[in-house]
Image (cartoon, rainbow, N blue to C red):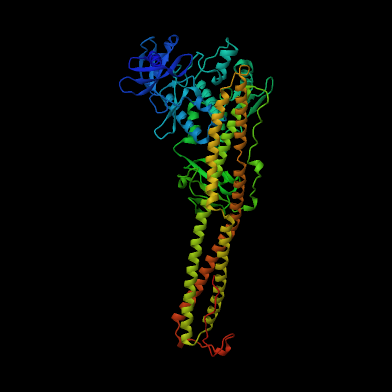
C-alpha cells in the first residue's frame, strides 16, 4: 500500500503530460529531462524541464526548434508548464537510446564506432547541420552529449542534433561575443578567452561550430577527444599550450603522463576501427578543420563539399575482397569519373595488372576491364563484394599466428584497487569486442572462400563437360568422313594429309581432356574442407558473441565495487577477487586460438586451391583452342570430300602410301584413348 502511495506521490504533470521523478533521463546546468506520457493519447515523449535561472533561453530554443524541422534534428511538439513548480517544459520526441556520448561509453565503442555505424552517424550529422545552416542558425554547443540516438522502425540508429538552448541566427559573416559551449569542444580562441586570458578581446564566428563539429567527429571515430592534457580540465594551461603549439596538419595532441611531452599525430590512432580508405578521408577533413583556427579558413560550405566525397549522390561505396590476402575494403568512389583500373591500383598499390581476375557473386566478370565505369558495380556489400584475385600468387605471404592473435591485457594487480581494476576491465572488454569483430570478419572470409571455389569450380566443370561434348562430336564427324572415304576406295594427297593431321590432333585433345579432368580433381582435393568443418568455423561467431555478453556483465559487476576499497567486507573482497579472475579468464578465452589456427589452415588450403586453379584454368583455355583448331581441320576434310568427285581425283596408288596396306581400306578408325 505504501509503495502504491509513494508511486502516486512521485507522479507529476504538465498541461497535457504526466511523468514520474524516477523516470529522469538526464540533467544538466540548464534543464532536467524526464520521460513523459501524453494524458490523452498515451504517446511517450521527452519532457525538458528548464531551470528557472535559464528561462531566458527557452524562447531562443523554441524559435530554433520550430524552424528546424528535419529527420536529423530532434522534433519539438509544444511548450507547457509544470503544474507544481511552474517551470517551462519543452515537449519533444523521445530518443530512448540516449546520446552519442552514452553510445561511446559502451565497451564496444571505447576506441570509437565501427565503420558502418560511424558512416551512419556522419551522414546524419552532416544532414542535420546542413539543414541548420540553410535555415541560418548556429548551434554553438555541438558535442556527443547533444546528439541524441533515436531507434528507427527497422531497429537502426537515427542521430539527431538536440539542445538548441545556445543556438543563434548567424550568417557566415556574422560575429558574436558570448562564451558558450563545452570546454573540450571549444574553439581555441574561445578557450583562451574563457580560461586563460579574460582580457583577450576577441569576437567569434561560425567557425566555432566547425571546430566543435571536428572534435565530435574525432571523438566518434576514436573514442576520445583530440587535444588533452594529462590533468584534463584541471590543467587548462597545458591544454591551451597544446592548442597553441599544434603544427599544421596535426589532428591530435595527447599528454600521456604527468609532466610528460605532448604526443602529436597527423593520423587517426591504430585503435580506430575505420578502414584505411575511410580513415584517410576523415583525417583529411579533420586536418582542414583543425588547421582553420590558425592557418587556412575552412567554412561550412567547404565541409559539406568534403562530406560529399563520402556520402554524396555520386559516391559509390564499393566493397572489395582481396581474396589471396584475406583483406576487406570499402572504397568511396566517384561514379562519374573513376574506372575499375584506378580502384584496383588503389588496392594493390601498383599499376593495374591485366591478369587480375574480378568476380561478382562468385562469377568471373572479366580480366581486362581497365575502362569499366564504377557504376557497373553499384550493388556491392560487405557480404557480397567484388572479389579481386591477382595471378601473382608467388608474392602471397601468410602471417604467423603471432600476427593474428592479440596478446591479453596485463593481469589484475594483487593489491585491491577497485578503480584501477575497473579501468583495466574496461580495456579487457574493449579487446574482447575487437576480437569478436576480427572473428566475424574471418568467418566472412571463409564464406567467400567457399563461394569462390564453388562457383569457379562449377563454371570450369561446365566448360570441361562442354569440351567433352565438343570432342565427342568432332570424333564422330571424323569417323563419318572416314567411312565415306573408305566407301570411295580412293583418296587424294590432301585427304590423306588431313586424315593424319586430324588423327594426331584427336590424340592430343583426348590426352589434354584427361589431364584437365585430373587437374580439376586435384584442385578440389586441395580445398577438401568438409561441410561439418565449415559449420564449425561458423559457430565461432556465436562463441565470440557469447564471450562479449559475458564480459559486459562482468564489467558491470566490477563497476559495482568502485570506491569501496576501504569499505568492503571480507565476503565482498572474496567476491571481488573471483570477479576479477572471471574477467581475466574471459579475456584469455576471447583469444580463440583454436579458431585462428583453423582459419590459418583454411587460408593455406584456399591458396593451394588457387595455385592449382590457375594451372588447370589455363589448361582449359588451351584445350578450347585445340578443339577450335581440330574443328577447323575437320571441316576442311569434310568440305574436300563433299565437293570433290572421285572421278576428278588424281588417284594415289595405295602401294605408295606409307603405312597403309592394299588389302584394307585406306582410312581406318584409329583407336583413341579417351578419359
Whether residue 467 is situated above or below residue 261 in the rendered picture: below
Q: In the depicted view, which residue is nearer to us: 217 or 156?
A: 156
Q: In the depicted view, which residue is nearer to us: 101 or 83?
A: 83
Whether residue 21 is situated above or below residue 291 in the rendered picture: above
The x and y percentages for residue 484 are 46, 82
The x and y percentages for residue 369 are 51, 52
Looking at the image, can residue 250 be seen?
no
Which quarter of the figure has residue 264?
Answer: top right
Whether residue 23 is situated above or below residue 473 in the rendered picture: above
The x and y percentages for residue 428 are 60, 31
The residue at the point 31 percent across, 23 percent down is: 41
Say which quadrant the N terminus sits in. Answer: top left
The x and y percentages for residue 216 are 52, 25
The residue at the point 54 percent across, 63 percent down is: 620
Q: In the depicted view, which residue is nearer to us: 587 or 171?
A: 587
Report whether 390 appears left or right of 15: right
Which quarter of the figure has residue 148?
Answer: top left
The residue at the point 54 percent across, 83 percent down is: 493
Say which quadrant the C terminus sits in. Answer: bottom right
Looking at the image, can residue 656 be seen?
yes
* Residue that extends furthest to the right in the rendered view of this protein: 260
Amino acid at each position: 500500500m505504501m509503495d502504491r502511495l509513494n508511486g502516486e506521490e512521485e507522479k507529476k504533470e504538465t498541461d497535457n503530460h504526466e511523468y514520474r521523478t524516477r523516470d529522469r533521463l538526464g540533467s544538466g546546468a540548464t534543464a532536467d529531462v524526464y520521460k513523459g506520457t501524453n494524458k490523452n493519447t498515451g504517446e511517450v515523449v521527452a519532457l525538458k524541464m528548464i531551470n528557472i535561472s535559464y528561462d531566458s533561453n527557452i524562447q531562443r530554443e523554441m524559435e530554433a526548434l520550430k524552424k528546424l524541422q528535419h529527420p536529423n534534428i530532434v522534433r519539438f511538439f509544444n511548450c507547457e508548464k509544470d503544474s507544481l513548480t511552474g517551470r517551462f517544459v519543452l515537449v519533444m520526441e523521445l530518443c530512448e537510446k540516449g546520446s552519442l556520448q552514452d553510445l561511446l561509453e559502451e565497451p564496444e565503442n571505447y576506441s570509437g564506432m565501427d565503420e558502418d555505424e560511424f558512416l551512419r552517424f556522419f551522414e546524419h550529422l552532416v544532414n542535420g547541420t546542413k539543414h541548420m545552416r540553410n535555415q541560418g542558425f548556429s548551434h554553438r554547443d555541438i558535442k556527443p552529449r547533444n546528439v541524441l540516438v533515436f531507434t528507427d522502425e527497422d531497429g537502426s540508429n537515427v542521430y539527431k542534433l538536440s539542445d538548441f538552448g545556445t543556438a543563434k541566427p548567424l550568417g557566415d559573416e556574422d560575429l558574436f561575443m558570448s562564451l558558450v559551449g563545452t570546454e573540450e569542444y571549444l574553439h581555441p580562441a574561445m578557450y583562451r578567452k574563457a580560461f586563460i586570458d579574460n582580457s583577450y578581446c576577441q569576437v567569434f564566428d561560425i567557425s566555432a561550430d566547425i571546430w566543435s563539429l571536428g572534435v565530435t567527429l574525432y571523438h566518434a571515430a576514436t573514442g576520445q577527444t583530440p587535444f588533452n592534457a594529462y590533468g584534463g580540465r584541471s590543467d587548462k594551461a597545458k591544454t591551451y599550450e597544446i592548442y597553441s603549439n599544434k603544427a599544421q596538419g596535426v589532428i591530435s595532441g595527447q599528454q600521456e603522463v604527468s609532466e610528460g611531452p605532448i604526443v602529436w599525430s597527423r593520423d587517426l590512432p591504430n585503435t580506430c576501427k575505420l578502414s584505411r580508405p575511410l580513415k584517410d578521408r576523415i583525417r583529411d577533413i579533420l586536418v582542414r578543420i583543425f588547421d582553420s583556427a590558425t592557418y587556412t579558413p575552412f567554412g561550412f560550405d567547404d565541409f559539406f563539399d568534403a562530406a560529399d566525397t563520402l556520402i554524396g549522390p555520386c559516391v559509390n561505396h564499393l566493397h572489395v575482397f582481396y581474396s589471396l590476402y584475406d583483406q576487406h575494403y570499402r572504397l568511396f568512389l566517384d561514379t562519374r569519373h573513376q574506372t575499375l583500373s584506378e580502384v584496383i591500383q588503389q588496392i594493390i598499390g601498383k599499376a593495374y595488372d591485366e591478369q587480375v581476375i574480378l568476380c561478382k557473386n562468385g562469377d568471373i566478370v572479366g580480366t581486362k576491364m581497365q575502362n569499366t565505369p564504377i557504376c557497373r558495380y553499384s550493388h556491392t556489400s560487405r557480404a557480397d563484394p567484388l572479389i579481386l584475385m591477382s595471378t601473382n600468387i608467388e608474392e602471397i605471404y601468410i602471417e604467423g599466428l603471432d600476427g593474428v592473435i592479440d596478446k591479453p591485457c596485463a593481469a589484475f594487480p594483487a593489491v585491491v584497487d577497485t578503480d584501477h581494476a575497473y579501468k583495466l576491465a574496461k580495456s579487457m572488454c574493449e579487446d574482447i569486442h575487437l576480437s569478436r569483430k576480427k572473428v566475424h570478419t574471418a568467418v566472412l572470409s571463409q564464406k567467400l572462400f567457399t563461394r569462390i571455389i564453388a562457383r569457379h569450380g562449377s563454371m570450369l566443370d561446365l566448360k570441361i563437360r562442354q569440351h567433352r561434348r565438343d570432342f565427342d562430336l568432332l570424333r564422330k564427324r571424323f569417323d563419318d568422313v572416314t567411312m565415306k572415304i573408305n566407301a570411295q576406295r580412293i583418296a587424294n594427297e590432301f585427304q590423306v594429309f588431313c586424315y593424319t593431321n586430324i588423327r594426331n590432333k584427336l590424340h592430343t585433345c583426348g590426352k589434354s581432356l584427361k589431364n584437365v579432368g585430373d587437374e580439376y580433381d586435384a584442385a578440389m582435393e586441395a580445398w577438401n574442407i568438409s561441410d561439418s568443418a565449415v559449420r564449425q568455423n561458423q559457430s565461432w561467431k556465436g562463441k565470440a558473441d557469447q564471450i562479449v555478453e559475458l564480459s559486459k556483465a562482468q564489467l558491470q559487476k566490477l563497476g559495482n565495487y568502485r570506491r569501496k576499497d576501504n569499505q568492503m567486507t571480507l565476503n565482498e573482497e572474496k567476491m571481488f577477487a573471483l570477479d576479477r579472475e572471471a574477467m581475466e579468464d574471459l579475456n584469455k578465452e576471447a583469444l580463440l586460438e583454436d579458431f585462428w589456427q583453423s582459419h590459418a589452415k583454411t587460408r593455406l588450403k584456399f591458396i593451394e586451391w588457387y595455385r592449382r586453379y590457375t594451372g588447370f584454368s589455363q589448361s582449359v583455355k588451351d584445350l578450347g583452342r585445340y578443339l577450335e583448331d581440330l574443328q577447323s581441320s575437320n571441316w576442311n576434310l569434310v568440305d574436300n570430300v563433299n565437293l570433290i568427285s572421285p572421278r576428278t581425283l588424281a588417284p594415289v596408288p595405295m602401294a605408295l602410301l606409307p603405312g597403309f596396306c592394299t588389302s584394307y581400306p585406306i582410312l581406318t578408325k584409329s583407336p583413341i584413348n579417351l578419359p
